[in-house]
Amino acid sequence: MADLETTDTVGNGVIIQCVKEGNKLRARVVSDGYNPNYNIRFPRDIRAEGVLYVVDEVRESSDGKSYAAYGKIRRLIQ
């Protein structure tokens, strides 16, 4: 896993979690107010199963079927 900044607070950020789906590792938004079934464009090289991340912002894609992460990505330490 890449050297990623860590945080123990979410603040105004959005929580992302990586989950195993078949043989793929998917990133999903777990913060309230987002569709939990949508995938999110998220860097593959930092994905780790079960790990929570905080991103600055999440935007819906133009097709309305997925999200994209924007801004800084930090690993959430609980």
Image (spheres, rainbow, N blue to C red):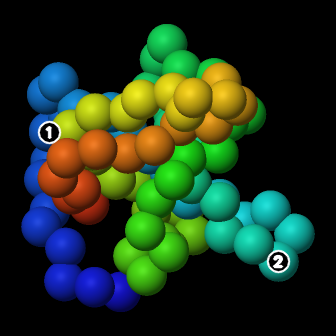
Examine the rendered structure and indicate whether residue 29 appears above or below residue 31: below
Q: Position of residue 63 (x, y in %)?
A: 67, 29
4 vs 2, left or right, is: left
**Residue 42 at what x, y percent from top left?**
46, 59
The residue lying toward the viewer, choosing from 51 and 34, is: 34
Disc with the residue nearer the chain's start (1 vs 2): 1
* Outermost residue, front side: 62
Q: Are marks 1 and 2 in contact (CB under 8 Å)?
A: no
Q: Quadrant of residue 58?
A: top left
Q: Is residue 28 visible?
A: yes
Q: Residue at x 51, y 27 (%)?
A: 60
Quadrant showing the N terminus: bottom left
Vertical placement of residue 39 versus 13, above or below: below
Q: Residue 67's x, y, as percent? A: 53, 37
Image location of residue 71, percent across then percent down: 19, 47
Can residue 76 be seen from the camera position used here? Answer: no
Task: Return the residue at label 1.
Answer: 9
Disc 1 marks which amino acid?
Thr
Count of residue discs: 2
Q: Looking at the picture, does residue 15 appear above or below residue 72? A: above
Q: Residue 29 got which mark?
A: none
Q: CA distance from mark 1 to mark 2?
A: 31 Å
Q: Amino acid at mark 2?
A: Asn
Q: Which residue is mark 2?
A: 23
Q: Which residue appears at 24% of the width and 56% of the height?
A: 73
User: Quick check: 26 left or right of 13?
Assistant: right
In front of the other: label 1 or label 2?
2
Front in this rendered view, residue 60 or 75: 60
Please, which residue is most extreme toward the top here?
Answer: 33
Label 2 sits on a secondary structure element that is loop
Q: Nearer the viewer, residue 51 or 43?
A: 43
